[in-house]
Image: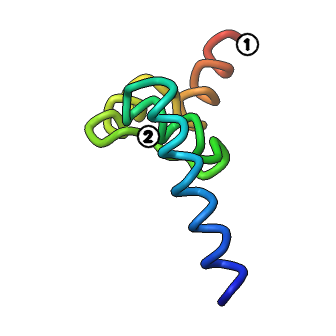
Amino acid sequence: VKELMVFLDIAVFEIILAYLEKRDWKEAFFTVLPQRKGAVPLGEANDLSKHAPCEKEDEDNDSDSN
Protein backbone atom coordinates (compact mmCIF):
# COMPACT_ATOMS: atom_id res chain seq x y z
CA VAL A 1 0.00 0.00 0.00
CA LYS A 2 2.85 2.39 0.79
CA GLU A 3 4.43 1.74 -2.61
CA LEU A 4 1.18 2.68 -4.35
CA MET A 5 0.88 5.89 -2.36
CA VAL A 6 4.45 6.87 -3.24
CA PHE A 7 3.75 6.10 -6.92
CA LEU A 8 0.60 8.23 -6.88
CA ASP A 9 2.40 11.09 -5.14
CA ILE A 10 5.12 11.01 -7.79
CA ALA A 11 2.56 10.85 -10.62
CA VAL A 12 0.66 13.86 -9.25
CA PHE A 13 3.91 15.77 -8.86
CA GLU A 14 4.95 14.94 -12.44
CA ILE A 15 1.56 16.06 -13.79
CA ILE A 16 1.84 19.38 -11.94
CA LEU A 17 5.38 19.89 -13.25
CA ALA A 18 4.25 19.09 -16.79
CA TYR A 19 1.41 21.60 -16.43
CA LEU A 20 3.83 24.29 -15.28
CA GLU A 21 5.94 23.65 -18.37
CA LYS A 22 3.11 23.33 -20.90
CA ARG A 23 0.35 25.48 -19.35
CA ASP A 24 -2.16 22.93 -20.64
CA TRP A 25 -3.77 20.38 -18.29
CA LYS A 26 -4.78 18.00 -21.07
CA GLU A 27 -1.29 17.92 -22.52
CA ALA A 28 0.21 17.56 -19.04
CA PHE A 29 -1.96 14.54 -18.18
CA PHE A 30 -1.32 12.75 -21.43
CA THR A 31 2.40 13.45 -21.26
CA VAL A 32 2.64 11.75 -17.87
CA LEU A 33 0.03 9.00 -18.16
CA PRO A 34 1.35 5.78 -19.71
CA GLN A 35 0.04 5.34 -23.26
CA ARG A 36 -0.33 1.60 -22.70
CA LYS A 37 -3.24 2.34 -20.34
CA GLY A 38 -5.22 3.61 -23.31
CA ALA A 39 -6.10 6.93 -21.71
CA VAL A 40 -7.99 9.26 -24.02
CA PRO A 41 -9.64 12.61 -23.28
CA LEU A 42 -13.35 12.53 -22.50
CA GLY A 43 -15.39 12.79 -25.65
CA GLU A 44 -12.55 11.48 -27.82
CA ALA A 45 -13.02 7.82 -26.88
CA ASN A 46 -16.05 7.56 -29.18
CA ASP A 47 -14.24 9.43 -31.95
CA LEU A 48 -11.35 6.96 -31.84
CA SER A 49 -13.68 3.98 -32.13
CA LYS A 50 -15.13 5.47 -35.32
CA HIS A 51 -11.70 5.85 -36.92
CA ALA A 52 -10.06 2.64 -35.72
CA PRO A 53 -11.07 -0.32 -37.88
CA CYS A 54 -12.15 -3.35 -35.95
CA GLU A 55 -10.67 -6.76 -36.71
CA LYS A 56 -13.82 -7.96 -38.45
CA GLU A 57 -13.69 -5.05 -40.90
CA ASP A 58 -10.04 -5.84 -41.61
CA GLU A 59 -10.91 -9.47 -42.32
CA ASP A 60 -13.76 -8.41 -44.65
CA ASN A 61 -11.43 -6.08 -46.54
CA ASP A 62 -8.81 -8.79 -46.87
CA SER A 63 -11.29 -11.31 -48.22
CA ASP A 64 -12.56 -8.78 -50.78
CA SER A 65 -9.09 -8.23 -52.19
CA ASN A 66 -8.40 -11.97 -52.67
The residues tagged by marks 2 and 1 sit, at their Cα atoms, a distance apart of 36 Å
Residue 63 image position (x, y, % from top left): 66, 21
Q: Secondary structure at mark 2?
A: loop
Residue 19 image position (x, y, % from top left): 45, 35
Q: Secondary structure at mark 1?
A: loop
Q: Which numbered circle lies on residue 66?
A: 1
- Above or below: residue 27 compared with residue 9: above
The residue depicted at 59 percent of the width and 57 percent of the height is: 11
Residue 60 occupies quadrant: top right
- Above or below: residue 56 compared with residue 24: below
- Above or below: residue 15 compared with residue 50: below
Q: In the image, what residue type sits under mark 1?
A: Asn
Callout 2: 10 Å neighbours few (<14), some, many (20+)? some
Q: Which numbered circle lies on residue 44?
A: none
Viewport quadrant of the C terminus = top right
Residue 44 image position (x, y, % from top left): 33, 33
Is the C-beta separation of discs 2 and 1 under 8 Å?
no
Relative placement, left or right, of 44 versus 5 is left
Residue 3 occupies quadrant: bottom right
The residue depicted at 51 percent of the width and 46 percent of the height is: 15
**In-front residue for pair 54/23:** 23
Viewport quadrant of the N terminus = bottom right
Between disc 2 and disc 1, whose residue precedes? Answer: 2
Q: Which residue is mark 2?
A: 40
**In-front residue for pair 1/9:** 9
